Image (spheres, rainbow, N blue to C red):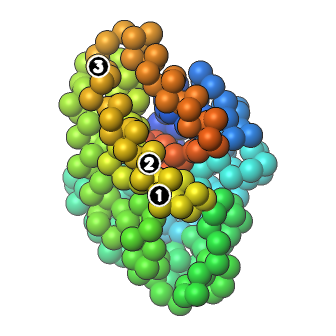
Amino acid sequence: MKADAIAAAFRAACLAELDALKPGNVHRFSAGHGMEVAHFERAATAAAPFIAAPGARVGVRIEGAVEASLKVAGLNTNLGIVLLCAPLAAAAERAGPLRACLQDVLDSLDIADAEAAFRGIAAANPGGLGRQDEHDVAGPARVGLREAMALAAERDLIARQYTNGFADLFDIGLARFDALDGAEPEARTEAVHLAFIAAFPDSHILRKFGAETAEQVRMEAAALLPRIDFRAPADERHRPLAAFDAALKARGLNPGTSADLTVATLFAAALVSR
């Protein structure tokens, strides 16, 4: 897949995610957490060429995309998206099935990837990251990027994808997306997003508010998920989604990792169909 097509697919995935009513996150129906849709739109456009840089190492893509996004948005809007989509973009350059190519990309990650990725993460300064006793992103990398991610995999869903070959993205996100083939694009995105919130305590909420709150949000999403017909008209499915959205934002809860995984799912869907 050529770089311009990869960049276009990345930007389209970022914008499509904003079109869906995703409870607790920023979207066209409601801003939140001091951020507007325009922040994410600018970041998507700025990051796309770096995500799709031909032949670039994954770490270089991450660092470049984060720096470009911060320059135009002025705040961290897409670190998780970039961390997930950089390996997918590198895999899309290779010949063969996306999932197999992605595994090869992950297997090839080295300490240089970790060094560049650490610089990007430190620059973005994600909420609730804190300091770590071992392999802190504020210090020099001492292991490869995949090994560094493995150390965080139990507490961070994005790191976990690096260790399990993006299994959650393929087996939950893409499976849910494919199951709704023929439904409205926004509905497919909403279904993927809610499926991720319902499946896991969101890592962003976990870091900022603790395990009990993250699990409570997961349980609320799991209870809501079977009540929504994602093939129904927008106004019908949006009533319960909007109520959940308002409830989460009233508590200051942002399931940002679930939104990141949703963007990556949309990006992967476009790459798989190439």
Q: CA distance from mark 2 to mark 1?
A: 6 Å
The residue under the point 43% across, 21% down is 240
Q: Quadrant of residue 164?
A: bottom left
C-beta proximity under 8 Å, tags 2 and 1: yes
Question: Foreground: 216 or 240?
Answer: 216
Q: CA distance from mark 1 to mark 3?
A: 29 Å
**Residue 189, percent from left and from top:** 40, 31
Disc 1 designates what residue?
A: 212
Q: Earlier in the sequence, mark 1 or mark 3?
A: 1
Question: Foreground: 157 or 39?
Answer: 157
Q: CA distance from mark 3 to mark 2?
A: 23 Å
**Disc 1 residue type (three-letter):** Glu
The residue under the point 60% across, 74% down is 118
Q: Earlier in the sequence, mark 3 or mark 2?
A: 2
Question: Foreground: 181 or 35?
Answer: 35
Secondary element under disc 1, as helix, strand or loop, is helix
C-beta proximity under 8 Å, tags 3 and 2: no
Secondary element under disc 2, as helix, strand or loop, is helix
Up-down relation of residue 110 to residue 264 (above or below) = below
Instruction: Identify the disc placed on residue 32.
Output: none
User: Of the residues tagged 3 and 2, which is closer to the observer?
Assistant: 2
The residue under the point 33% across, 70% down is 163
Mark 3 crowd level (few <14, some 14–19, many ≥20, 10 Å Cα): few
**Residue 59, percent from left and from top:** 53, 69
User: Of the residues tagged 1 and 3, which is closer to the observer?
Assistant: 1
Instruction: Identify the disc placed on residue 229.
Output: 3
Disc 2 designates what residue?
A: 216
